[in-house]
Image: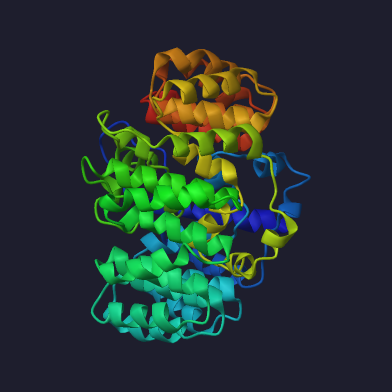
């Protein structure tokens, strides 16, 4: 219980620093407050972070234990936020202007004995854009711990100052880890170095399913739209891994969508925050530490004149019908890259792990906003009748991205479902669909739901809808 108290103090410190996602619906700034007490609290919590590790077991006997069952993107963001000790602390440190905190941040990045704490400090330092910090990032990028090297590449990608590309190119070419080579390649592509595409295309032929999946994901973000058919061809040949099938499908959809208007799908790419879904999710504060788990559905951006290859829809139908609850077979579970993936230590790393452990996230990204009649009919059936709450939640959310009133009946049914996975999925569907007709249901959840985090989430949606009750509660 003491560990949970420390963690919740960190979360509330982040809120006090201005990162709470409830929007200010009045349009006027709030009063200026003395944040000295908050600063001192963050200093104390940063020290406590060195000695504290939160696990799912700490939640099992509390009302927050239900968070572990969540299975939709917003659910994953909340679950990670309340099971990964450093995410809220990183967010609080990122927006502080206190010099003492910044000095301690540099010390942590250099000397912390816990790799997770050091990695978080490295990434947070990058947001300060201080040229003097380059030496710390450079030291980290050669560290023996892959989690620290991953954080250093991420820091350089955020920082983006002179000399960055040379160091990233070196990692892409000589790092001992294939995962790090892919991670460095996407960072270079985010900075405009198209030569890194060769590394991603080579990754599609890897024996490791993690490398094939990551390569496909970043090709969708950065490849030439004219290469759409290359990814479709790879999809036709992929039979071994569900995550690779999903990522190839998403990547192909992203590329065909960019045959129309230019779209930014990577959180590191210019213009990403201009996407409607991103701006709506992060709100006016413009701060969220789990940006890679915000979905920008490519289907909503595909011109009606363009035809999607049938193999994409067929593969995705099979995944949602038959594979959402499946686990990796023993051989794939022992892929060395899975171990490396599980060694990631930053919020982005946690999000990447979620992407390759929760198939429902990828299926939602691939199906969200579909107008295909067969896909819609199947999703409607699942949203109404499936006995699997994860399938119901995924189907409701996938349909909600179209914001069509005809989908409201089964979404409102989901809002009163006894199963927390289905109930939270329905709330998220309300949020992305912007279904204001559900306000009475949200009011009931905000006041009476047995899961405290669900009550807060309902309040947040009410506030986004402009209902003052959300902020009052």
Of 410 and 123, the residue lying toward us: 410
Task: State the count of labels.
Answer: 0
Of 211 and 24, the residue lying toward us: 211
Of 173 and 11, the residue lying toward us: 173
Task: Note whether residue 16 is visible.
Answer: no
Q: Which colour scheme is used?
A: rainbow
Decide: is 287 above or below 49.
above
Task: Note whether residue 350 is visible.
Answer: yes
Position of the N terminus by quadrant? bottom right
Residue located 55% across and 61% down the image: 210
Left or right? Give the position of 195 relative to 35: left
- Where does residue 262 sit, x and y in percent of width and height? 22, 46
Residue located 36% across and 35% down the image: 308
Residue situated furthest left in the rendering? 261
- Where does residue 140 sit, x and y in percent of width and height? 46, 82
Decide: is 97 above or below 269.
below
Residue situated furthest right in the rendering? 61
- Where does residue 178 sit, x and y in percent of width and height? 51, 73
- Where does residue 44 sit, x and y in percent of width and height? 56, 68
Decide: is 393 above or below 213.
above
Residue located 42% across and 42% down the image: 295
């Amino acid at each position: 219980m003491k560990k949970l108290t420390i963690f919740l103090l960190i979360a509330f410190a982040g809120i006090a620093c201005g990162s709470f996602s409830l929007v200010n619906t009045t349009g006027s700034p709030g009063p200026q407050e003395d944040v000295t007490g908050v600063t001192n609290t963050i200093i104390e919590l940063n020290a406590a972070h060195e000695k504290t590790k939160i696990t799912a077991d700490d939640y099992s006997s509390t009302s927050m234990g239900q968070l572990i069952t969540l299975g939709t993107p917003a659910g994953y963001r909340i679950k990670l936020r309340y099971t990964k000790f450093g995410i809220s602390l990183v967010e609080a440190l990122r927006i502080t202007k206190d010099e003492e905190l910044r000095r301690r941040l540099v010390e942590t990045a250099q000397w912390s004995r816990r790799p997770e704490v050091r990695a978080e400090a490295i990434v947070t330092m990058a947001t300060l854009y201080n040229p003097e910090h380059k030496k710390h990032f450079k030291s980290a990028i050669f560290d023996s711990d892959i989690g620290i090297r991953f954080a250093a590449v991420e820091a350089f990608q955020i920082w983006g100052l002179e000399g960055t590309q040379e160091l990233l190119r070196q990692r892409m070419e000589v790092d001992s880890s294939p995962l790090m080579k892919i991670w460095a390649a996407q960072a270079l592509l985010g900075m405009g170095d198209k030569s890194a595409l060769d590394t991603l295309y080579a990754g599609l032929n890897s024996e490791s399913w993690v490398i094939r999946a990551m390569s496909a994901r970043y090709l969708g973000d950065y490849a030439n739209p004219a290469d759409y058919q290359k990814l479709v061809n790879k999809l036709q040949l992929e039979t071994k891994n569900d995550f690779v099938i999903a990522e190839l499908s998403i990547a192909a959809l992203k590329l065909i969508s960019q045959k129309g208007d230019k779209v930014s799908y990577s959180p590191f790419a210019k213009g990403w925050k201009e996407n409607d879904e991103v701006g709506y999710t992060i709100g006016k504060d413009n701060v969220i530490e789990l940006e890679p788990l915000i979905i920008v559905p490519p289907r909503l951006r595909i011109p009606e004149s363009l035809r999607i290859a049938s193999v994409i829809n067929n593969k995705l139908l099979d995944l949602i019908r038959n594979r959402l609850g499946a686990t990796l077979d023993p051989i794939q579970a022992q892929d060395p890259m899975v171990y490396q993936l599980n060694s990631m230590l930053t919020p982005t790393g946690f999000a990447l792990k979620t992407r390759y452990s929760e198939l429902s996230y990828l299926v939602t990204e691939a199906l969200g906003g579909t107008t295909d009649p067969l896909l819609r009919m199947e999703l409607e059936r699942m949203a109404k009748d499936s006995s699997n709450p994860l399938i119901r939640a995924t189907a409701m959310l996938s349909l909600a991205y179209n914001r069509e009133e005809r989908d409201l009946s089964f979404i409102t049914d989901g809002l009163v479902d006894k199963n927390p996975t289905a109930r939270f999925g329905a709330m998220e569907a309300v949020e992305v669909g912007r279904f204001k007709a559900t306000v009475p249901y949200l009011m009931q959840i905000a006041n009476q739901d047995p899961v405290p985090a669900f009550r807060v989430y309902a309040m947040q949606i009410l506030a986004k809808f402009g209902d003052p009750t959300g902020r009052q509660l």
